[in-house]
Amino acid sequence: MICVVVREKGSVDGPEVYTVYPASSVLAYESVTIIHFIVAGVGMFIGYSQFSFGYLIAIGYLAFAFGQMYLIMPFKVCPHCPYTRLKDARCVSGLNRLSRRVAGKGDLSRFDERAIGILCHNNLYLASQIAPIPIIATALVLDPSLVLAVLLAAVILFLVARVVLFFKRLACPHCAAKKVCPNAKMLGLQ
């Protein structure tokens, strides 16, 4: 499928708004997400392997990270996103297409609920990316290791890349939902 570009009303110099994100953007976003989660899980597994419960920390994290991204998001967030309502649209994660099949179309006025409350999806999503840092850092203090230090650095770099490159450049500026999205508001893109 080709990328569909729409200019914002009255915008000449603004970023292109995609109703269908390029497949390369979706692939990049999903690859970084999956690799980020796996590297963090491996870091936790290695970092706590000397404890009998160490593997449970890694498995628990991976279940949480993948669950919030690939179960909670398509069932709780995506149905209310404008991309789920647009025919043949594809958001930067591509999850709107899955959501449309498994959860149907939701209520657009509820889209901002993704950022309301302490256990809202936005906070869970951030936790899945940030929580590995102190968890792996603690393991590094308990048992210093070059491999663990490299994994911790990689997790930090993935987080920085997601915020600086993906959210601020690849995803949010081109998003057709940015006028109603709490994430775009948080990044100053509305």
Image (tube, rainbow, N blue to C red):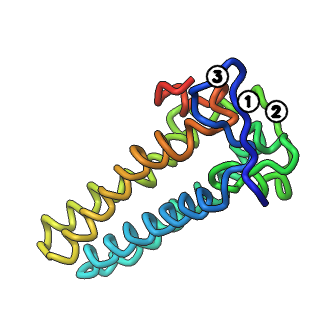
Whole-percent x, y for residue 67 in the image: 59, 61
Q: Please indicate whether residue 10 sits to the left or right of residue 36 in the image.
A: right
Q: Are marks 2 and 1 in contact (CB under 8 Å)?
A: yes
Of mark 3 and mark 1, the one earlier in the sequence is: 3
Q: Given this view, does label 3 or label 2 mark the residue nearer the observer?
A: 3
Residue shown at the point (66%, 55%) measured from the top left: 22
Which quadrant, please, contains the N terminus?
A: bottom right
Whole-percent x, y for residue 12 in the image: 62, 24
Mark 2 → mark 1, Cα distance in angstroms: 6 Å
User: Tag on residue 11?
Assistant: 3
For mark 2, what is the residue? 107
The relative height of residue 145 versus residue 170 in the rendered view (above or below) is below
Kindly state the secondary structure of the residue where label 2 is placed.
Answer: loop
Write down the quadrant of residue 53 in the picture. bottom left
Whole-percent x, y for residue 107 in the image: 82, 33
Q: Please indicate whether residue 12 sits to the left or right of residue 5 in the image.
A: left
Kindly state the secondary structure of the residue where label 1 is placed.
Answer: helix
Q: Amino acid at mark 3?
A: Ser
Res. 57 visible in picture: no
The relative height of residue 49 versus residue 9 in the rendered view (above or below) is below
Q: How many discs mark residues in the rendered view?
A: 3
Q: Amino acid at mark 1?
A: Arg
Residue sitting farthest toward the front: 12
For mark 1, what is the residue? 110
Closest to the observer, 18 or 32: 18
Residue shown at the point (83%, 52%) measured from the top left: 100
Q: Given this view, does label 3 or label 1 mark the residue nearer the observer?
A: 3
Whole-percent x, y for residue 38 in the image: 44, 71
Q: Are marks 3 and 2 in contact (CB under 8 Å)?
A: no
Mark 3 → mark 2, Cα distance in angstroms: 28 Å
